[in-house]
Amino acid sequence: MPKSSNDWKNFRRIFQSLEKNRPVLFFVAAAVKRWLFFSGFVLATTYSGRAQTNFAFAADHGGLILPKGFQAVVVADRLGSARHLTVRDNGDVYVALRRPEGGGGIVALRDTNGDGQAEVEERFGELGGTGIRIHDGYLYLAQVEGVIRYRLRPDALMPELPPETVVSGFPRQRQHADKPIAFDEAGGLYVNVGAPSNNCQERDRTSGSPGKDPCPELERQAGIWRFSADALNQTQTEHGEHYATGIRQAVAMCWNPAAGALYVVQHGRDQLDLWPQLYDEEENAELPAEEFLLVEPSDNFGWPYGYYDQLKGKRVLAPEYGGDGEKAGRTAQYKNPILAFPGHWAPNDLLFYRGSQFPEKYRGGAFIAFHGSWNRAPLPQKGFKVVFVPFKGRLPSGKAEVFADGFAGRDVVAQVDDARFRPMGLAEGPDGSLYISDSKQGRIWRIMAGGQPQK
Ligand SMILES: [Ca+2]
Ligand SMILES: [Ca+2]
């Protein structure tokens, strides 16, 4: 991550140029992109050699703006309130819905003729959820109060019913109830439990109300719990290992096998403008950072006592706990992010790319889906894009860049409801295709490098 404030200025400038001056960025990156296009072309030739080549690529990338050398198939559309998604090794796609729609909380999709578009759509499940992943022959779904799993049957799109309960007993809560799940390679299942408030105030989201100290929400929320991936009927209080704390809410969570570590991207706190004597409109929009965190056992990232200020490059004491917008106070003891994004972009999924279909620079790197903000007003809303971060080992090895854009369908988004699509979930197919879900209309894209020329 950037070490000095100059680095931070540069980092911020990059993002501003991504936002405001796309042609300049493209010019600067032209040489790299030419190389990427060439390697993408070679990969596509290899790829078509062992698979069919009649993908139904959308003429307009299905509404997206992609780097040169990439194309998109619209796998399915209008599925409902799509959340995370996962792809089976036979190419079947499972999409979690926030709530049951059209007969189920999970949508199962199958492409029967190899053009990338799903002809078969089945729905099942009495409840919806957010986190959905396949592990060891089971389809796991994270619901608000627990985790269930369905046994997958050979070649069958529909799993065995009914599901088994893996974990139950998470607190009922209105805010930040959505849960992501991740698996390590040692039989561990990770569940993030979000904070039930904005910043643990005595009166939530109320100007001048002090923070509870210590914050009791940290006992069972605002952190990550580790369970056994294979044991049934576990509860948070009896079986959960309290893996990390001080994370307000993370919907983007992924185990990175190359690093042997868990990563999340946190939703930073909202509404610093409840303290208008300390923060102006621009600071309320930009701060605090959305934090990309490398999570190790017993880590504490400091919510609600402080937040990460990406402009100052340090943790700052929260105004609810006596902060003045400048001083670090007790937050100096908490672990810093490995990278920081502008405020309120709402990172909702994280994926480390493991395939070989995409060009070399993407391998081992991180894709992050930013759902887009609701609370940067009176400034425009931001986010609504999928960003790529190159990695080497455990840490980013270069600058974050926009990978897929155009979701919002307009240059300036005044209100979140104006966005046409909102990127929500990410998944990788067995052939290295990148799948993206949209929560607004329920569209699913499959992004591929190379492939046949666009018609
Ligand atoms: Ca098809
Ligand atoms: Ca926020």
Image (cartoon, rainbow, N blue to C red):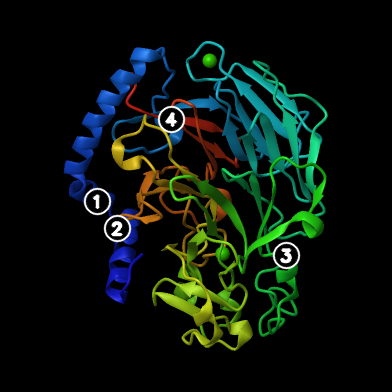
- Which is more foreground, mark 3 or mark 1? 3
Whichever of callouts 4 and 2 sits on the residue coming sooner in the sequence is 2
Name the quadrant containing residue 231.
top right
Residue identified by numbered label 2: 17
User: Does any portion of residue 441 appear in the rendered image?
Assistant: no
Numbered disc 1: secondary structure:
helix
Position of residue 274 in the picture relative to residue 37 (left or right): right
Q: CA distance from mark 4 to mark 2?
A: 30 Å
Residue identified by numbered label 4: 432
Q: Badges 3 and 1: C-beta atoms under 8 Å apart?
A: no
- Residue at 31% in and 35% down: 359
Vertical arrangement, residue 311 with respect to residue 347, above or below: below
Q: Which of these two is toward me, 363 or 132? A: 363
Residue identified by numbered label 3: 196
Q: CA distance from mark 1 to mark 2?
A: 7 Å
Residue 35 position, x and y percent, is 20, 36
